Structure formats: C-alpha cells, structure tokens
Image (cartoon, helix red, strand yellow):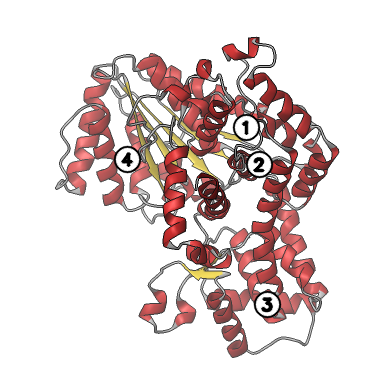
Amino acid sequence: MKVQSKKVGMMLHRRTRAISRLTSRTLWSRCWTMGLQSLMNLKQVSCLFLELLWQSMGTNTVTCTGESQYPAGPSDSPGRLDSFAAVTVYLRSRLLDTFSAPAASMAMRPSLQEAYTNLLNLLSSTAETPGSNHSFLLLGARGTGKSLVVHRVLAELKAKYNTDESRPVIGFVRLTGLAHTEDVVAFREIARQLCKSFNCKYSKAASLAENLAFLREMLQDLGRGHKVVVFVLDDFDLFAKRAKQTTLYNLLDALQSAGMQAAVVGLSCRHDVMELLEKRVRSRFSHRKQLIPEMEEKDFDSPGNSPRDVLAAMLAMPDSDSSTAQTGGPVQQWNSAVSQILSTDAVAHQLKLMMNQGFGTPRDLADVATDAVLSMDGQHKVLQQSAVLAGIASVRQVHDQQGDIVGSCSVLELFILVAMYRIKRRGHDSANFEMVHDEYCKLMEQGNTGDKRSKAAALRAFERLLASRLVSYVDSRAEEKGGLREFHSARVTVLLQEINAGLRLQKSCPGLLKNALAHEAVRNTFAH
C-alpha cells in the first residue's frame, strides 16, 4: 500500500506541478491533456492522501501570505539527519514547501544572490532609518527565482527585527495582481493583513474609503512607533493595467508622506512595466529596479549558473549538518551520490537538450529535482541516476504534449495562433478575434501570398483553437454569455517553445509562418 501510494503521489505530482506553475494557462485543459482526470478514482485518491500525509511529516503549514502557522518540526533541523529516511523527508520539505526551514538552506545562483543582497540592504535601511522609504522592482522571466529572492529577504527581516512576536517591528503585506487588482479587494486585503501583523481588530464591513483612511492612519501610527510595513506586489504589471491605478498611487504616495516608514516591492516578468505607469504614479516611484537574467546556453558550464550547479543546490544537503563529520554518514553518502550523478555525461547531455529546447529554467530544474526525490521508494538509500533522468524526461514530456497538440492543427489555425502570439509580444496579454484577424492579414501581406483565407474561415479556425484549449477566453463565462464571440478577449495558453515544436511537427507548414515566429523568437531573446 505504501509503495503504491508513493507511485500514485509521484505520478500526480509530475502533472499537477506542471499545471500549477503556469497560472495564466487554462488549468482544466492541461488536466485533460495529461489525463489527470482518469487517474482520480477513489482508491488512488485514498493512496494519494496517505502519501501526502507521509510527505507532510516534518514540513510547516503555510498560509497564503507566506507565514507558517506552526513552528518548525523536528525534521526541519539539519542536526537530526541521522538516517536516509530523514534526508529524504528533509529534501521533500525543501522542494514542496518554499517557506520551510530546509528551503532556506538551499544555495542560490550568483544573480539571485546579488538581487537578494541589494533588496535586503534596501529594506534594512527602511527599517533602521526613519524617512528612508523605498520602492523597488524585481524583473525577470517566469521561473527565474524572483519569488524565491523575496521569500528569503522577508524571512531574514522577520528573524532579525521581529524577535518578540507579540510586539513586531516589521509587518508584511503581500498582494497579487491575479486576485487583488480591484481597488475594493486590494485595500480590504491590505487592511486584513495589517491587522493580522500588528494585532489589531479587523472590520470586514469597512468600505473602500474607510480602508483607505485606515491605511494612512495605520502607517502614521506605526511610523511614530518606528515600525515598518513592506508591501510586496506580485504581477506588478497587472496592477499597472488598471484604468486609474488607484492601488499603486496610494501606496507610492504614502512613501512620500512624512512620518511613515514603508517600502513597496514589485515583481514582474515585463521589462517595460515602467512604461505602463501613469505620470502621477511614475513620478512617485524611485526607479530602482534589478533584472534577474535567465539561464542561457552559453552559461551551461559557468560556475554557479549552470543547470548542474542549480540542480546540485536543490538536491545537496547542507554542509553545516553535524552528521557530515561522520565518515560514511547518510548526508555524506547522499551528497557524494548527487555529485557523481550530475557529473555523468548522460545527465549532462539531457540537461543540454533541455537548455536547447528552452525548458532549462530554475522552475523546470526544481520539477526535475522533485520528481527524483519523490521516486525514492525505499529500495535505494541514495539518489539514483535513473531517477534524475526520469525527472528530466517527465519535464520534457509535459512540454512535448502541448507541442503535439499544436502540430496537429491546420495551417490556418497555426497562422491564427502565431498572430495571437505576435500581439502578445507587443504587450497585449489578450486580444479579440478582430485584432487577431488584422494581424493575420498583415502576415499574409508581408509574405505576398495568395493563400489568404476568408474571414469566416479564420473565425472557424479561431473557434477550433478555443475548443482545443490552445486559446482560452479571459472571461470564463464568455461561452455562456454567447453573443458576438469574436469580440470577447482571449489569450494564448501555450509557450513560444511549444509553438515552435508544433511547427516542426507540421509537415506542410509554410516558410512564411516559420519566419514570422523566428522573428518573434529573436525579439524575445533581445528583450531578456
């Protein structure tokens, strides 16, 4: 029963991790594509529950704001790793819970370490120097480690300044553009988190005006007591797309007020996010920003930045562990096995293929490490090379499945898909059919081809893309509303690499289409 539960848990984890990491995609279409629904019968759910219960031993329960509800368990302490089972539990806690103590022991690559140091120094000056308020932007593609840097910095600040939990010196408010772009929702959540951080009474019935007044009064009172608030805005660009940008204006305006100690940290994958800000908001922003670069093929052998070094940091146990002093101890044997596996030519070749196909992001490597650790079934005490290779194959398979779906599309459907991606590269996350058709016409005019199809045929191709979930409506109720479907906003749910893979599978794909997408790939490279 235990072995079966591990296999089911590992199999479901490979699929759900690939789904949950891309929130902008259509989740249920990914589930359907990977056959997840067929796995969820009663027996397997019970096995999965037992597996997750077993995995949770030694991990923390984490709230949506990133704060642990319970103190660290015994397995979070590196000094107690005196068996191979404890090593496995420790690594599972590190990889599955980004807020746990084991996760904090993982070494970061140099670019992340530099961003961590700069952000920590900036926020420390805000906490220690009255009137030293700052705003900061952390930019980088999805999966490069922006959230990891912020988690580490907030944990360090909390440990340094909040020595007495009943009287905290620094509080944190975390918002996401995926859920808090509405002003009413954003300021209600700000009020709730402020009350929770500083032990105040929270009123659910407060209006927007009341929450705005509460924010300023709270910041003034905290400033007089030399207490600090750090606002973290995930998907900062989504807040900037609001018509009036009320949330950003009020937060940044508070930094200009005397007697308040606060900082605003924004995370975004858009490098042109400053151009989206209104003049009144841009004038209040300090224009401090840092770019976290992606891992590139030229860095494959670069110390600290190579995929092997990143994967080793995820899988290796901390050297400060007391059991490393024992010759042949569990931690020493594990680290030795990890070092030997990652230095083999077979693993290096597969990692090279991942980088060439554009799947070698730190998030992809984290999936590889998680699959490898979850495959430990008790038959082997240390990590096996076959487990790492299976994890790499699993990550590649997730991307290849979407490429197969793209490759099964007709040529007209591929034109519509590429047209939507070109619109997305110009800064529009969504587009209706009329915009897509205009872009399609421009493509055909550039190629001077006479194969241009009618608008009605293009609309049917657009609807087939919707049916196959390669494109999805922004409003999930658009299909229920009916009406003029061509005027509902939709977005692409596949990556550039997956579209490229699909074009390679399409034997009748015209050169015009490949050149159009290759041009966008070049623009994407220079943008980062």
**SS class, disc 4:** helix
The number of numbered badges drawn on the structure is 4
Q: Which residue is outermost to the top? A: 325
**SS class, disc 3:** loop
**SS class, disc 1:** helix
- Residue 68: image x %, image y %? 36, 31
| Kind of residue indicated by mark 4 | Asn
**SS class, disc 2:** helix
Residue in the image at 46% along x and 62% along y: 40
Which labelled disc corresponds to residue 250?
4
Which labelled disc corresponds to residue 314?
1
Give whichever of discs 4 and 2 has the lower sequence position: 4
| Kind of residue indicated by mark 3 | Cys
Give whichever of discs 1 and 3 has the lower sequence position: 1
Residue in the image at 37% along x and 49% along y: 245
Q: Nearer the viewer, mark 4 or mark 2?
A: 2
Measured in 3D between alpha carbons, the distance from the residue under mark 4 to the one under mark 3, in whole angstroms, is 47 Å
| Picture quadrant of residue 33 | bottom right
Q: Is residue 182 visible?
A: yes
Asked whether the beta carbons under mark 2 and mark 1 sit within 8 Å of each other, the answer is yes
| Kind of residue indicated by mark 2 | Leu
Asked whether the beta carbons under mark 2 and mark 3 sit within 8 Å of each other, the answer is no
Measured in 3D between alpha carbons, the distance from the residue under mark 4 to the one under mark 2, in whole angstroms, is 39 Å
Residue in the image at 30% along x and 24% along y: 258
Which residue, given by chain and number where applicable, does mark 3 sit on?
409
Which residue, given by chain and number where applicable, does mark 2 sit on?
365
Task: Check disc 2: other Cα within 10 Å, few if <14, some if 14-19, many if 20+.
Answer: many
Task: Check disc 3: other Cα within 10 Å, few if <14, some if 14-19, many if 20+.
Answer: many
| Picture quadrant of residue 457 | bottom right
| Kind of residue indicated by mark 1 | Met
In depth, the one of 37 and 207 nearer the eye is 37
Q: Nearer the viewer, mark 1 or mark 3?
A: 1
